[in-house]
Image: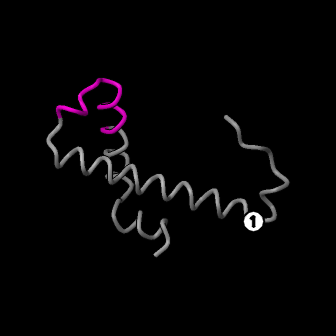
Amino acid sequence: MRPLDEFLINYDEEGSRTYLWRLIKSAVTGEFGSLPRKERTDLMYFYEQLDGLLTDIYKHREETPESRTEGSGDA
């Protein structure tokens, strides 16, 4: 199964935003270690799924001829 399909099956938009916010907030505030084990596991799984999705997106972009002529995309 492609990472995009897998991600969309596991997370809807609202859930994705919630997990992303919770992950960032816990990292910034230092509360990650005090979260229940299940929640830490869920957040790490979300991160791994998101990482796979990003890898797939950029791999696909590199394979697309039109993307080679556009800017570098550096932020």
How many neighbours does mark 1 have within 10 angstroms: few (below 14), some (14-19), or many (20 or more)?
Answer: few
Residue ID at (73%, 66%): 63
73 to 63, vertically: above or below? above
Provide the major secondary structure of the magenta segment.
helix
In the rendered image, residue 67, in percent from the top left (x then y), is placed at: 77, 57
Give the residue number, with chain letter if any, for mark 1: 64
Specify the segment rendered in magenta: 22-34
Q: In this view, does 22 lie to the left or right of 6?
A: left
x and y percentages locating residue 24 in the rendered image = 37, 34
Q: Position of residue 56 (x, y in %)?
A: 57, 62
* Residue pictured at 37% horizontal, 43% vertical: 20
In this rendered view, identify the residue nearer to me: 70 or 63: 63
Along the line of sight, the residue nearer the viewer: 55 or 75: 55
User: Residue placed farthest to the left in the image?
Assistant: 36
**Magenta highlight on residue 27:** yes
Farthest residue in the top direction?
29
Find residue 73 and report its image quarter: top right
